[in-house]
Image (spheres, rainbow, N blue to C red):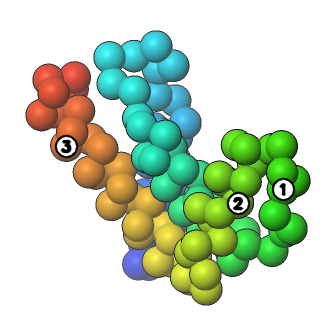
Amino acid sequence: MSEDAELDAEFERVVQLVQNLPKEGPYQPSNGEKLRFYSLYKQATVGPCDTSRPGFFDLTGKAKWDAWNELGDMSKTDAKRKYIEAFAKMEQKMKDLGHTQ
């Protein structure tokens, strides 16, 4: 398996883990962690932010857009790597809190 294919497979595996975290589980990611995952996912799958900033009253949309836009021209490959790294950090936090084995 090529290095790119391995990265893609690991990224997809981690995306599934993040998206399937229990909504009411013992560990709840912070809003900052959620925005980080969102922005890195968008960068990894779409590329640099290419949409207009949401309107004044869409606070959630603006926060997501800002987080994604801050990544600038980061490559899709780097975004995938950083997404995996962010999950590893979150997973370590969960272990430190005794929420995983």
Compare marks 2 and 3 and give the one earlier in the sequence. 2
Q: Residue at x 52, y 29 (%)?
A: 20
Residue contact between numbered discs 2 and 3, judged by CB atoms under 8 Å: no
Residue type highlighted by circle 2: Trp
Residue type highlighted by circle 3: Gln
Residue contact between numbered discs 2 and 1, judged by CB atoms under 8 Å: yes
> Residue 28: horizontal and vertical position, in percent?
40, 27
Separation of marks 2 and 1 at Cα, in angstroms: 7 Å
Q: Residue at x 58, y 73 (%)?
A: 70
Which residue has dot 1 on it?
Answer: 54
Query: Regarding mark 3 in the picture, which secondary structure is present there?
Result: helix
Residue contact between numbered discs 3 and 1, judged by CB atoms under 8 Å: no
Q: How would you rate the neighbour count of disc 1 (Cα within 10 Å): few for under 14, some for 14-19, many for 20 or more?
A: some
Q: Which mark is residue 92?
A: 3
Query: Regarding mark 2 in the picture, which secondary structure is present there?
Result: helix
- Is residue 13 visible in the rendered structure shown here? no
Separation of marks 2 and 3 at Cα, in angstroms: 27 Å
Which residue has dot 2 on it?
Answer: 65
**Residue placed farthest to the front in the image?**
56
